[in-house]
Image (cartoon, rainbow, N blue to C red):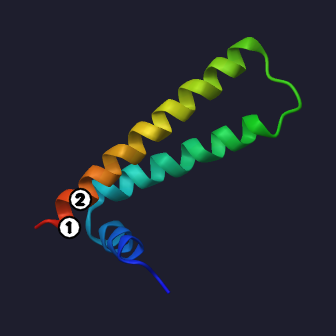
Amino acid sequence: MPTDFDELKHQMLESNDEFRQLATLHHNLDEQIHALATRPYLSQPEQLEEVTLKKKKLALKDQMEGMMRSYAHH
């Protein structure tokens, strides 16, 4: 059974272009991180890239959650 959070996220994905773009970017970063995580060894630059991607992904998540809080209070 979907939670209110899931319902709100689904609503915003359907109705808010900016939120949908952020969600797409978040998903793409997740795929890039996963691709790096499946490698048996990461070079120094790849390790730095992985950390950078994780930070960007987290920032997008925070931005999306902020948008959801604003939307929920209107």
Q: Is residue 31 above or below residue 44?
A: below
Left or right, residue 14 beside residue 29: left
Which residue is drawn at the image coordinates 38% and 73% (left, top)?
Answer: 10
Look at the numbered disc 1 and give the secondary structure of its residue. Answer: helix
Q: Are marks 2 and 1 in contact (CB under 8 Å)?
A: yes
Left or right, residue 16 beside residue 29: left
**How far from the left and from the top, in percent, is residue 62?**
36, 44
**How far from the left and from the top, in percent, is residue 32?**
64, 40
Q: Is residue 34 above or below residue 7?
A: above
Screen quadrant of the C terminus: bottom left
Q: Is residue 45 above or below residue 25?
A: above
Q: Residue furthest top?
A: 44
Q: Residue furthest right?
A: 40
The residue that label 1 is drawn on is 72
Q: Residue furthest left?
A: 74
Which residue is drawn at the image coordinates 59% and 46% (left, top)?
Answer: 30
Give the class, few, some or many, for how many residues have Cα within 10 Å of label 1's Cα (few <14, many ≥20). Answer: few
Q: Which sits in the foreground, 15 or 38?
A: 38
Residue kind at label 2, given as amino acid type: Arg
Which residue is drawn at the image coordinates 14% and 65% (left, top)?
Answer: 73
Give the class, few, some or many, for how many residues have Cα within 10 Å of label 2's Cα (few <14, many ≥20). Answer: few
What label does residue 69 carry, if any?
Answer: 2
Which residue is drawn at the image coordinates 54% and 51% (left, top)?
Answer: 27
Residue 72 position by quadrant: bottom left
**How far from the left and from the top, in percent, is residue 7?**
37, 77
Look at the numbered disc 2 and give the secondary structure of its residue. Answer: helix
Left or right, residue 24 beside residue 45: left
Residue 38 position by quadrant: top right
Residue kind at label 1, given as amino acid type: Ala
Whole-angstrom CA distance, mark 2 to mark 1, is 5 Å
